[in-house]
Amino acid sequence: MCNNYQNQKGQALIESVIGLTYVIVPLLILLPFMAKLAGIQHRAEQASHYTAWERTVWKASDPSRLPSRTGIYLAKKTEIELAKQIPWRLYQQTGIRLTSTHKQKWDWATSIHPTLKHQLIHDGNQTVMLKSHGASPANQNELDRLTQSNKGERLPGDVSKAIDRIVGLLSYTGFSLERDQFYRTSVNNELENLYLAPFSNLNLSVQGNNALLASGWNAAGPYHVKNRVERLVLTKIMDMGVIQLAQRSLAILPFGKELKSSELKFGYVEPDILPENRLCTYGTTNCGG
């Protein structure tokens, strides 16, 4: 009994040393690095969500049946303009105000959040973890360290195909809707070969993906609403010169006053259904200003 006890003496200490050396200490070293990776992944996911949502409100091109006249209100933003907003909104350090126009220039070296920096070499300074697209980093270019893609496509599935056929039939009347409103977005960040002993050449990349279904109805003002809806009104085909001439002729008769073209309007659509005193220009006094 005594000999067995003496042989086992110090076993718990040796197990603790081995556990600390090969398990606990490496985990403690990896925790800050893993936290930074999780931060980059979170930002990539947020960026993909932001890109998908922005595309639903900022159009890349004019919607169908958009008339060429005043009174058209359409928010448009190119793919590059949309992507350049990602670093400002999601990768910037704390304290930078969000705005549509920035007076200062973006700088990946100074504008990025401190948690997105890490050592590239042993005993080196903290530098940006995100890898540049070129051999020489273009720190003034917001798109230098991220890749963003955004494409609209038709909704997959049997139900969507049936709806697509119905909308296609309505197109014979001149009515049309955008059917590429299922947006798939992706934001990708490649990481530098970071110093993480004993590991080397960690070719890591982080990607965020999102999909968002938006409405194909994009009304860009009252004239756009009128131009679209009136194609669903069947009596619109009677709104022609010959019938209007007949209406004016019948209006001469005592019982035909209500038949004149200014009173009986075929295919008439009026988008402004509110009383005039309830209409206002957004941004003015008493109207969102």
Image: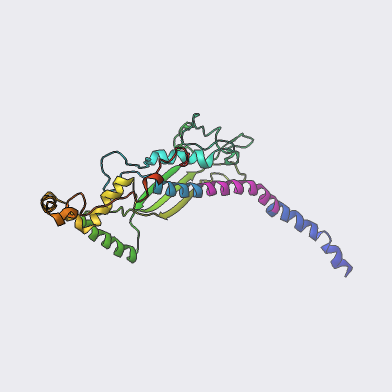
Question: Is 2 placed above or below 263 here?
Answer: below
Residue 192 in view, yes or no: no
Question: Residue 59 at what x, y percent from top left?
Answer: 36, 45
Question: Residue 222 at what x, y percent from top left?
Answer: 32, 46
Residue at 64% across, 35% down = 123
Residue 92 lies in the magenta stretch: no
Q: Farthest residue to the top: give it.
A: 104
The colour scheme used here is: rainbow
- Please state if 267 lies on the left or on the right of 57 as rendered: left
Secondary structure character of the magenta stretch overall: helix
Residue 132 in view, yes or no: yes
Residue at 37% across, 54% down = 215
Q: Is 167 in front, or is 145?
A: 167
Q: What stretch is highlighted in magenta?
A: 24-43
- Please state if 168 lies on the left or on the right of 42 as rendered: left
Question: Residue 173 at what x, y percent from top left?
Answer: 21, 56
Q: Farthest residue to the front: give it.
A: 254
Residue at 49% across, 36% down = 99
Q: Is 274 in front, or is 25?
A: 274
Question: Residue 37 at what x, y percent from top left?
Answer: 57, 47
Question: Is 123 placed above or below 269 here?
Answer: above
Residue at 35% across, 53% down = 181
| Quarter of the N terminus within the rendering | bottom right
- Please state if 185 lies on the left or on the right of 38 as rendered: left
